[in-house]
Image (cartoon, rainbow, N blue to C red):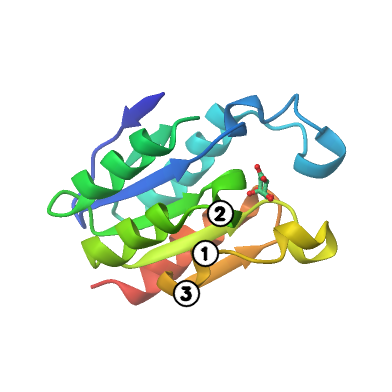
Protein backbone atom coordinates (compact mmCIF):
# COMPACT_ATOMS: atom_id res chain seq x y z
CA UNK A 1 0.00 0.00 0.00
CA UNK A 2 1.43 3.46 -0.89
CA UNK A 3 0.08 6.98 -0.67
CA UNK A 4 1.42 10.54 -0.93
CA UNK A 5 0.32 14.09 -0.06
CA UNK A 6 1.69 17.58 -0.77
CA UNK A 7 3.72 20.12 1.32
CA UNK A 8 7.22 21.67 1.16
CA UNK A 9 9.76 20.68 3.87
CA UNK A 10 10.33 17.47 1.97
CA UNK A 11 9.00 13.95 2.30
CA UNK A 12 8.91 11.62 5.29
CA UNK A 13 8.94 7.94 4.38
CA UNK A 14 6.61 6.07 6.74
CA UNK A 15 7.41 2.39 6.51
CA UNK A 16 5.55 -0.49 8.10
CA UNK A 17 6.74 -4.05 7.98
CA UNK A 18 5.23 -7.51 8.22
CA UNK A 19 1.75 -8.06 9.62
CA UNK A 20 1.14 -4.36 10.23
CA UNK A 21 -1.38 -4.45 7.38
CA UNK A 22 -3.49 -6.39 9.90
CA UNK A 23 -3.61 -3.48 12.36
CA UNK A 24 -7.07 -3.05 13.82
CA UNK A 25 -7.87 -6.73 13.70
CA UNK A 26 -4.56 -8.29 14.79
CA UNK A 27 -4.31 -8.91 18.55
CA UNK A 28 -6.25 -5.70 19.36
CA UNK A 29 -5.44 -6.07 23.07
CA UNK A 30 -1.79 -5.44 22.11
CA UNK A 31 -1.99 -3.28 18.98
CA UNK A 32 -5.35 -1.54 19.37
CA UNK A 33 -8.31 -1.33 17.02
CA UNK A 34 -7.14 1.38 14.60
CA UNK A 35 -6.44 0.28 11.03
CA UNK A 36 -3.13 0.92 9.29
CA UNK A 37 -4.77 3.29 6.82
CA UNK A 38 -6.11 5.36 9.75
CA UNK A 39 -2.66 5.34 11.36
CA UNK A 40 -1.15 6.52 8.08
CA UNK A 41 -3.82 9.21 7.80
CA UNK A 42 -3.09 10.49 11.33
CA UNK A 43 0.68 10.51 10.74
CA UNK A 44 0.21 12.18 7.36
CA UNK A 45 -2.00 14.87 8.93
CA UNK A 46 0.65 15.52 11.62
CA UNK A 47 3.33 15.65 8.93
CA UNK A 48 1.29 18.01 6.75
CA UNK A 49 0.73 20.32 9.74
CA UNK A 50 4.53 20.47 10.09
CA UNK A 51 4.97 21.06 6.35
CA UNK A 52 6.09 17.60 5.24
CA UNK A 53 4.83 15.31 2.51
CA UNK A 54 4.57 11.64 3.36
CA UNK A 55 5.08 8.48 1.42
CA UNK A 56 3.49 5.57 3.27
CA UNK A 57 4.42 1.98 2.45
CA UNK A 58 3.61 -1.30 4.14
CA UNK A 59 5.12 -4.56 3.02
CA UNK A 60 5.37 -8.10 4.32
CA UNK A 61 8.55 -8.57 2.25
CA UNK A 62 11.97 -7.59 3.56
CA UNK A 63 13.34 -6.82 0.08
CA UNK A 64 10.51 -4.40 -0.66
CA UNK A 65 11.29 -2.55 2.59
CA UNK A 66 14.99 -2.48 1.64
CA UNK A 67 14.19 -1.07 -1.80
CA UNK A 68 12.00 1.63 -0.25
CA UNK A 69 14.79 2.67 2.15
CA UNK A 70 17.28 2.81 -0.74
CA UNK A 71 14.83 4.88 -2.82
CA UNK A 72 14.44 7.32 0.09
CA UNK A 73 17.98 8.58 -0.45
CA UNK A 74 17.52 11.74 -2.47
CA UNK A 75 13.73 11.64 -2.30
CA UNK A 76 12.98 11.78 1.45
CA UNK A 77 14.31 13.84 4.34
CA UNK A 78 13.58 11.32 7.08
CA UNK A 79 12.29 7.81 7.75
CA UNK A 80 9.78 6.54 10.29
CA UNK A 81 9.93 2.77 10.48
CA UNK A 82 8.02 0.09 12.32
CA UNK A 83 9.74 -2.98 10.92
CA UNK A 84 7.52 -5.37 12.89
CA UNK A 85 9.26 -8.68 13.54
CA UNK A 86 12.10 -7.79 11.14
CA UNK A 87 13.21 -5.39 13.89
CA UNK A 88 14.48 -8.39 15.81
CA UNK A 89 16.05 -10.29 12.91
CA UNK A 90 17.19 -8.00 10.10
CA UNK A 91 20.80 -6.91 9.81
CA UNK A 92 19.91 -6.01 6.20
CA UNK A 93 17.37 -3.36 7.24
CA UNK A 94 19.84 -1.90 9.73
CA UNK A 95 22.51 -1.76 7.02
CA UNK A 96 20.08 -0.06 4.63
CA UNK A 97 19.15 2.62 7.19
CA UNK A 98 22.81 3.23 7.97
CA UNK A 99 23.62 3.26 4.26
CA UNK A 100 21.19 5.98 3.20
CA UNK A 101 22.33 8.38 5.95
CA UNK A 102 18.85 9.78 6.61
CA UNK A 103 17.54 10.47 10.11
CA UNK A 104 15.34 7.54 11.06
CA UNK A 105 12.91 6.98 13.92
CA UNK A 106 12.07 3.46 15.03
CA UNK A 107 8.49 3.03 16.23
CA UNK A 108 6.82 0.13 18.03
CA UNK A 109 3.17 0.35 18.96
CA UNK A 110 3.59 -2.03 21.89
CA UNK A 111 6.17 -1.75 24.65
CA UNK A 112 8.43 -4.48 23.33
CA UNK A 113 10.41 -4.44 26.59
CA UNK A 114 7.39 -5.67 28.52
CA UNK A 115 6.98 -8.58 26.12
CA UNK A 116 8.87 -11.75 25.20
CA UNK A 117 12.67 -11.69 25.52
CA UNK A 118 13.16 -12.07 21.75
CA UNK A 119 11.46 -8.69 21.24
CA UNK A 120 13.92 -6.88 23.53
CA UNK A 121 16.69 -6.70 20.97
CA UNK A 122 16.42 -4.46 17.92
CA UNK A 123 18.95 -4.43 15.11
CA UNK A 124 17.55 -1.04 14.08
CA UNK A 125 17.95 0.93 17.31
CA UNK A 126 21.69 1.45 16.82
CA UNK A 127 21.14 3.12 13.44
CA UNK A 128 18.03 5.15 14.31
CA UNK A 129 18.25 8.57 15.95
CA UNK A 130 15.21 7.96 18.12
CA UNK A 131 13.25 4.93 19.32
CA UNK A 132 9.61 5.23 20.41
CA UNK A 133 8.01 2.20 22.02
CA UNK A 134 4.76 1.56 23.83
CA UNK A 135 3.01 4.82 22.92
CA UNK A 136 0.44 2.95 20.84
CA UNK A 137 -0.34 4.34 17.43
CA UNK A 138 0.55 7.83 18.75
CA UNK A 139 4.17 6.72 18.40
CA UNK A 140 3.95 7.61 14.71
CA UNK A 141 2.83 11.17 15.53
CA UNK A 142 5.59 11.45 18.15
CA UNK A 143 8.04 10.38 15.46
CA UNK A 144 6.73 13.09 13.12
CA UNK A 145 7.03 15.59 15.95
CA UNK A 146 10.65 14.54 16.60
CA UNK A 147 11.54 15.01 12.92
CA UNK A 148 9.64 18.32 12.86
CA UNK A 149 11.77 19.58 15.76
CA UNK A 150 15.10 18.23 14.51
CA UNK A 151 14.97 18.75 10.73
CA UNK A 152 15.47 22.17 9.11
C1 LIG B 1 5.81 -4.32 16.79
C2 LIG B 1 6.51 -5.19 17.83
C3 LIG B 1 7.19 -6.37 17.14
O1 LIG B 1 7.83 -7.18 18.12
C4 LIG B 1 6.15 -7.21 16.42
O2 LIG B 1 6.77 -8.28 15.74
C5 LIG B 1 5.31 -6.41 15.51
C6 LIG B 1 4.82 -5.11 15.95
C7 LIG B 1 5.03 -3.16 17.46
O3 LIG B 1 4.66 -2.25 16.73
O4 LIG B 1 4.77 -3.19 18.66
O5 LIG B 1 4.93 -6.86 14.44
O6 LIG B 1 6.79 -3.74 15.94
Instruction: Say which residue appears at 48% left-offset and 45% top-offset.
Output: 43
Q: Position of residue 12 (x, y in %)?
A: 32, 51
Residue 74 seen in render: yes
Q: Which residue position holds label 3?
A: 126
Q: Secondary structure at mark 1?
A: loop
Q: How many marks?
A: 3
Instruction: Identify whether 84 is placed above or below 38.
Output: below
Residue 91 appears in which quarter of the rendering?
bottom left
Report the front residue among 37 and 123.
123
Residue occupying the far left of the picture: 74
Residue 102 seen in render: no
Left or right of 21: which side holds 148? left
Q: Which residue position holds label 1?
A: 123
Q: Are marks 2 and 1 in contact (CB under 8 Å)?
A: yes
Instruction: Identify whether 121 is placed above or below 15.
Output: below
Q: Which mark is residue 83?
A: none
Q: Is mark 2 within 8 Å of ligand 1?
A: yes
Q: Are marks 1 and 3 in contact (CB under 8 Å)?
A: yes
> Gap between marks 3 and 2, in whole Å?
11 Å
Q: Which residue position holds label 2?
A: 87
Residue 35 appears in which quarter of the rendering?
top right
Amino acid sequence: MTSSTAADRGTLLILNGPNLNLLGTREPEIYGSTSLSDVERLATAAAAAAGFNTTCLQSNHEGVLLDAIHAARGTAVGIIINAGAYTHTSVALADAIAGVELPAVEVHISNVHQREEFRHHSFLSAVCQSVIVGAGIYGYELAVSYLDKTLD
